[in-house]
Image (cartoon, rainbow, N blue to C red):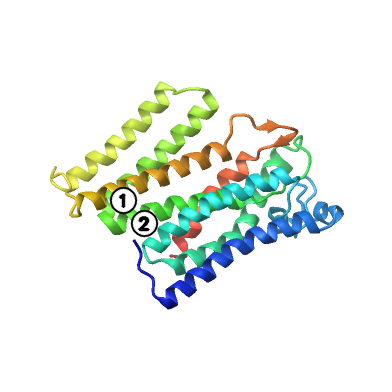
Amino acid sequence: MVNLGASSRYGVGSDLILILLISALLASIHFLAPTALQQQLALTPSDPQWYTVFTAAYVHASASHLTGNLFGYFLAVSYTYWLCLHTNRRQWFRRTTIALLLVTPIVVNIGNILAFGSVLPEVEGYSRGFSGVVSGFGGFLLVAFVVAVKDTYGSELAEVVGVSLVLLLLLLVSVVYSGGIQPLVAGLVAFGIGLQVIGALYERDWELPTVDVASRTFAFQVVSGGLVVTVLAVLVVSLFPAALVEGGTFTNIVGHGIGVLTGCVLSVTVR
């Protein structure tokens, strides 16, 4: 439990306002801006306007498109903020959030131009939506979780958890697109995790780590960590679905992948 003083409660309130203002901005643009203006703000990868590499992230094709992105945004940002609050890193949350809002759209849409404007010009239409930034918050959540493990249990366990979690999420992506567990991929993931565990034990002269916390506290931390991992899994399945085209809408997994990497890099850089 985090004990907040009066000034801290005021700061938390301002953080929550920032989180809600982002969603309000997205909704306002979609429901209040003229359709013609929204189309001008969207990105056409084969014929991009310079400003659309940023503005395209803040317009949406439909209300369902907006709703889906807002769901992913609130899911990622709420758990990320909870971890930052728990580890007393609210300033890190603010700096990274602002960086994600300003930088991620540009990086993702430059990737979209390279992928769909040059390499795959046959893919036509507009590129728009906040999902690239949502992916960035997913990357931020991953880093925030590893940082929380480091603060609680040390850097050795944090490294093992971080690498293992990335490998397991990649395995989940493989399961989504292959329709089942591929023995080779699963074997490589198990091998990678095993190497991490063996390396950590070797550094400790094969001494198993001990947990110096009350059993109830440890149980709460395990459940909380499992919840964060579940949220990351939900985000991965949502951002990298098996059906890339549904209802005439193409899910840009290239942009989502770039967004996750950008979120990880930005969150580490601005720490």
- Left or right side of 104 for 85: left
- Which quadrant is home to the C terminus? bottom left
For residue 142, above or below residue 180: below
Query: Which element is circle 2 on?
Result: helix
Q: Nearer the viewer, residue 192 or 27?
A: 27
Q: Amino acid at mark 2?
A: Val
In the rendered image, residue 178, in percent from the top left (x then y), is placed at 52, 24
Q: Is residue 102 in view from this perspective?
A: no
Q: Are marks 2 and 1 in contact (CB under 8 Å)?
A: yes
Q: Residues within 10 Å of mark 1 (few under 14, many from 20)?
A: some
Query: Which element is circle 1 on?
Result: helix
* Residue at mark 2: 147
Q: Nearer the viewer, residue 67 or 100?
A: 67
In the rendered image, residue 145, in percent from the top left (x then y), is placed at 39, 52
In the rendered image, residue 24, in percent from the top left (x then y), is placed at 67, 60
Q: Is residue 59 in view from this perspective?
A: yes
- Left or right side of 83 for 132: right
Closer to the chain start, of discs 2 and 1, is: 2
- Which quadrant is home to the N terminus? bottom left
Residue at position x 27%, y 47% in the image: 219
Locate residue 62: give its quadrant.
Answer: top right
Residue at position x 46%, y 36% in the image: 170
Locate residue 6: give its quadrant.
Answer: bottom left
For residue 155, above or below residue 208: below
